[in-house]
Amino acid sequence: MKVSLFITCMADIMTSNVGKDTVEILERFGCEVDFPDTQTCCGQPAYNSGYLENTKATMKHMMKVFRESEYVVGPSGSCVAMLRGYEAIFRGDPEWEEEAKKLAAKTFELSQFLVDVLGIVDVGSTFKGKVTYHPSCHMTRILGVKAAPVQLLQNVEGVDFVELPHGEDCCGFGGTFAVKNSVISGQMVQEKADHVVETEAEYLVGGDMACLLNIGGRLSREGSYVKVVHLAEILNTVK
Amino acid sequence: MTIQNRESFLDNLANTLGRPRRKTGVERPKWSLSPQWEVYDGLSQDELVDVLEQQCKVIHTNFKRTNFDGLSEMLKSAIKGHDGNKVLAANDRRNKEYGLEVIFDDLKQEGVDVRLWDSAIGTENQVFAEQADIGITFSEITLAESGTITLFNDKDNGRSISLLPRVHVVIIPKSTLVPRMTQAVKQIHEANKRGREVSSCVSFISGPSNSADIEMNLIVGVHGPIEATYIVVDDK
Amino acid sequence: MGIRIGDPSFETRVQEGIENDFMLNSVASAQGRFRGRRGVATEELGNWEDWRSLGEEIRSHTLENIDYYLQQLSDNVSKRGGHVFFAATADEANEYIKEVVKRKNGKKVVKSKSMVTEEIGLNKALEEAGSEVIETDLGEWILQLDGDVPSHIVTPALHLNRDQIKETFANKRGYDKSNTPEELGLFAREELRKDFLTADIGITGCNFAVAESGAVTFVTNEGNARLATTLPDTQISVMGLERIVPTWEELDVLVSLLTRSAVGQKLTSYITGITGTRLAGEIDGPEEFHLVIVDNGRSEILGTEFQSALHCIRCAACINVCPVYRHIGGHAYGSIYPGPIGAVLTPLLDGYENHKELPHASTLCAACTDVCPVKIPLHEQLIRHREIMVEKNMAPTAEKIAMNGFVKWSTHPAAYKLSSKLARTALKPWTKDENITNGPGPLKNWTAQRDFPAPSQQTFRSWFKERQKGEKSK
Ligand code: SF4
């Protein structure tokens, strides 16, 4: 099975190990992974700020990048939801409608791809520690992926899973919101960090790097010992 | 009666919707889903009574059940239990059938001031209702799911009876039970379609009045009755 | 009062909210309870999504044919002895109501809770005309005594705690009992009962009007709307033009959605449908009835991509799940309609100029969209608002420059690659132990609240490239 990795700009620049782990997991399950190297960003920062018309250029660029791909898989619920969202945005556009539709149909978030497409619920990895999981907003509510990441995580040998109280609450990232309304965002991430600490978990796991950066940044500011890791990192921890 | 500014107002709405005004010919579609009909579908009357009893706990309502012969005792003890010295009842067509007239006479003998709503005496009804301890009504349709009784208020069944007294006591013939509001509104809708005018006041009442306006804490009894008692009467 | 409330500056309002611990505690605990109850009440049905779809279908059909249903409604109200006044603006509505009150020599007016009368500023208009107006909903009464404004559309005094309420009762009404909700509630009952018995006019809102029979319905728990429509001789009900259902059958569905979403109740204590004036021989109910149907900017929403915002049944579920609302409180929105629906509706009804921050006061987390019982895509409408403000050239210049830069960057792979490679080096001066605590430019606001990690040593793409080379040479 041929899979094109959609790395997302965040993971590309900030946390490249997440990308590496994603590649290795996919290869472990027999995927042939390529990386269309002209890919950039899904366009969310500008789109969510109201710059729809300008952002269409970015979206078209991304559609071209993945035009030949069989599957597109990325380690982020939010960015994958955006790529899939092109379909609604270009509806009625004679030139791009079909292309956007095709991209939406073949694009998957990592855990979603593993569970729904490859049918794998246990990746056979081992990770020792008390772990909690933040179900990010776009992953669960926009993309609709709720069970897959938790299922994968709970099947990892050695994982002591604790539920995050009020997990479904937003961490306060919200893209440019974190900068534009930084005071409100600060209150929100504080609350989220408090809930994480409450679980007494050693690790906070998530499927969206941006949220993890946000929560991790707050935990770090407080000098908390909780480590923040992406789901891919845990799934790629094999004995 | 007067209707003012209607034409310009509605023309403008049609305009913003980008089409000519629709004055006739709009049919309510057949909705693609009907989840409301699935709730407690197929339950027997007795099962519905059980649902009602459970719900009464949720809505802080005293639930009592009796058969026809036991009603007299049950109602009297409810009135006494609520310290009912002044009682106002609807002038309901069923008062006689259910033996309430006899019960009321007994109570009067015992010194309880029992009155029936009497449209001939005007606002005196309201004055008495305001002082009354207990208001007594019959439920027309009873919604098991929500613990709701339905009143079609009219000249013999004033709105005040279920509103102004401290306690509301409702007699619920078992045959009036339906699963939920769905069945009740269907009756109203169909009667309306047949040209029967709907009551000037349809009251769906679920237990005593309450409020959560202070710190989301439930206060039972605000402007309406502070307590409610339902008496389900098995049919003869 | 009108739709706008509070200090003119959004930043100030937010700051006031964030610093008000009392208020935030009340809001957070109320939200917690609301959410729990709503969750139970919707899950126990087992097919909540079907209910939502049906709700959406009903609302959308009704709005598409709103002129037809309003005509039917007004005909039926008139047939049952009521007067109907269609008001294009708040002023028209207030003038008409003032006229009626004056003609009836209405010295004392009792009101039940109604957002639309808040929106048009009716109380002020009536007081100017010399009437005493008494809010009888417990929450509204507290606010009225206190000279305060609502912070929530279902429980308007959500931001106050029992001590503050006791304080208000003591100062304004000589209350001398405890701060328990029961005693406070009982006091309100006794005080307001006197007013109900002596009022000349009852004014209500309207949750849903039923077109087929001309009924106006009220969904309440306290019983004050029933009193206001039972005792006074004149009743005036005010409704937004969208608050209507075709028949009693749709009323059932929408009321069920409303009560479960709003307070987690299967039904509220009272669902009351009043049709026209009292009939011959009836003692209770008004002898004169007026229905005022208000546009006040709503018609301009029809036919636009925001039309579904008019589907709103004012359940406040979106407000009760909103994390932004939880952290700033209702007053920070500067509108009587706070939270997600407020952020959508307020700019539509009152223009962008005074509310340009509202569409940005959201992380787009979509919790609101998820709970809305009539499926309004609230977070998408917030994005659409942002788009319109960009189109209207209302966005800050710095943002425009940044966004243009972003688009260039994300459509030019070479530039993207270069900058991503340089990111780590560029942030070097601010980096200490792989961590940034006080970043430059846009990072400044970020690091004011939290740390930012140093970018990876090597970007993913260069790792991948090296790996491929390695594999080839293997
Ligand atoms: S927008 Fe939806 S959730 Fe919010 S108040 Fe309106 S109906 Fe309720």
Image: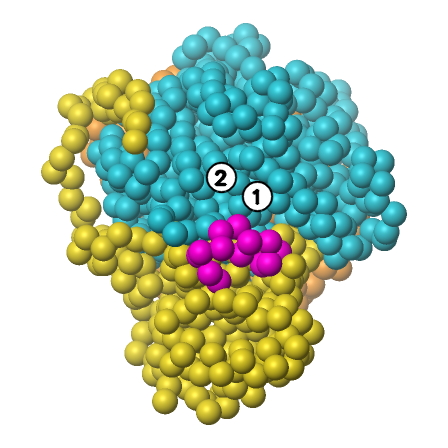
Chain colours: A orange, B yellow, C cyan
Q: Chain letter of disc 1?
A: C
Quadrant for residue C308, please give it: top left
Q: Which kind of residue does numbered mark 2 sit on?
A: Asp
Q: Secondary structure at mark 1?
A: loop
Q: Which residues are magenta?
A: B117-130
Q: Are marks 1 and 2 in contact (CB under 8 Å)?
A: no
Q: Is residue A235 above or below residue A70?
A: below
Circle nearer the N terminus (1, 2): 1
Residue C105, x across and y down, in percent: 54, 26
Residue B118 belongs to the span the image colors magenta? yes
Which residue does the image show at 62% across and 52% down from the upper left?
B223
Whole-number angstrom distance, CA of label 1 to CA of label 2: 27 Å
Q: Residue A162: give x, y in percent of width and height.
A: 65, 64
- Name the one closer to the observer, B6 or C151: B6
Label 2 marks which chain's residue? C
As drawn, C316 above or below B194: above
Judge whether residue A179 is colored magenta. Answer: no
Horizontal and vertical percent for residue B12?
27, 19
Q: Is residue C174 visible?
A: yes
Which residue lies at the image location 84% right of the left edge and 44% below the top edge?
C175
Q: Are marks 1 and 2 on the same chain?
A: yes
From the viewer's perspective, tell me whether residue C141 is left or right of residue C474. right
Determine whether A55 is above or below A221 in the image.
above
Taking the view exactly as shown, the residue that stands out farthest to the right is C176
- Considering the numbered disc 2 on the image, is that residue within a helix, a strand or a loop? loop
| Mark count | 2
Q: Tell whether circle 2 marks a residue whose Cβ is less than 8 angstroms from ligand 1.
A: no
Please name whichever residue, C85 or C464, is drawn nearer the observer in this view of the structure. Answer: C85
> Residue under circle 1?
C154
- Which residue does the image show at 50% across and 71% down from the upper left? B170
- Residue to which mark 2 is pinned: C233
